[in-house]
Amino acid sequence: LKKASLKPNDIEIVAIGWEKPPRRMWSFDVLRNSLRSTGNNFDLKRFGYEISYWTYLGLQDMELQAFLKRFQGVKKVIYYSHHLAHAASAVFPSSFDSGNFITLDNRGGFESGLLGCFKNGDIEIIARMPIKSSVGAMYENVTELLGFQPHSHEGKVMGLAPYGEPKYKNLIL
């Protein structure tokens, strides 16, 4: 705000790169995601992580709403697809007029990625990757297998990966 010489009341619209968090717990989705990530074997620990995840998102939304009350100029909060926000943050500041993009992570809302193209400021989504195809979920599972905290320490696993030996490759794949 300082750099642009703006005051909090000058902000009219806030955009969030995540689907609007649920007002109530989506227990069916939590259960489904718990089963998907464990090969349809119910895992109470995984179910706990899912509950924590959705509760965290709901609390984040409540904190955001409380924070925004301090900005009296805000008239609207817009929620965008998590992966669309990833794509837009790469596409729009680029020097290209057209091109292709792919976004991949564990999940953003109910997807694990997007495939698309852009031309002259327009984004076209070609395909959406479901959570069950998530490369990030594979990292999450490996993170947990190694004794690290899922949803938190995947970066440590990725950072340590080049120093390991592929002796467990066939077990994981």
Image (tube, helix red, strand yellow):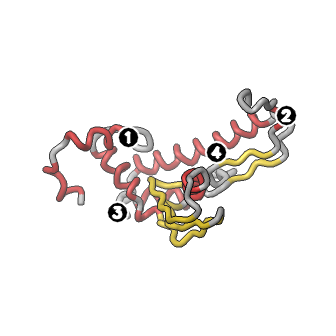
Q: Give the Cα separation between the discs numbered 4 and 2.
A: 26 Å
Secondary structure state at the residue bearing disc 3: loop
What residue is disc 3 on? 39
Q: Residue furthest top?
A: 2
| Residue tagged 4 | 58
Instruction: Residue under label 2, please give it.
Output: 9
Going from N to C along the chain, the mark reached first, 2 or 1, is 2
Q: Earlier in the sequence, mark 4 or mark 2?
A: 2
How far separated are the C-alphas under marks 1 and 4?
A: 24 Å
Q: Which residue is mark 1?
A: 155
Q: Position of residue 124 (x, y in %)?
A: 60, 69
Q: Describe residue 17's horizontal placement relative to residue 150 as left or right.
A: right
Comparing marks 2 and 3, which lies closer to the viewer? 2
One can see residue 109 in this view: no
In the image, is residue 62 above or below residue 82? above
Q: CA distance from mark 2 to mark 3?
A: 50 Å
Q: Which numbered disc, 2 or 3, marks the residue that appears first in the sequence?
A: 2
- For the residues bearing labels 1 and 4, Cβ distance under 8 angstroms: no
Decide which of tag 1 and tag 3 comes sooner along the chain.
3
Q: x, y (%) of residue 84?
A: 59, 58
SS for callout 1: helix
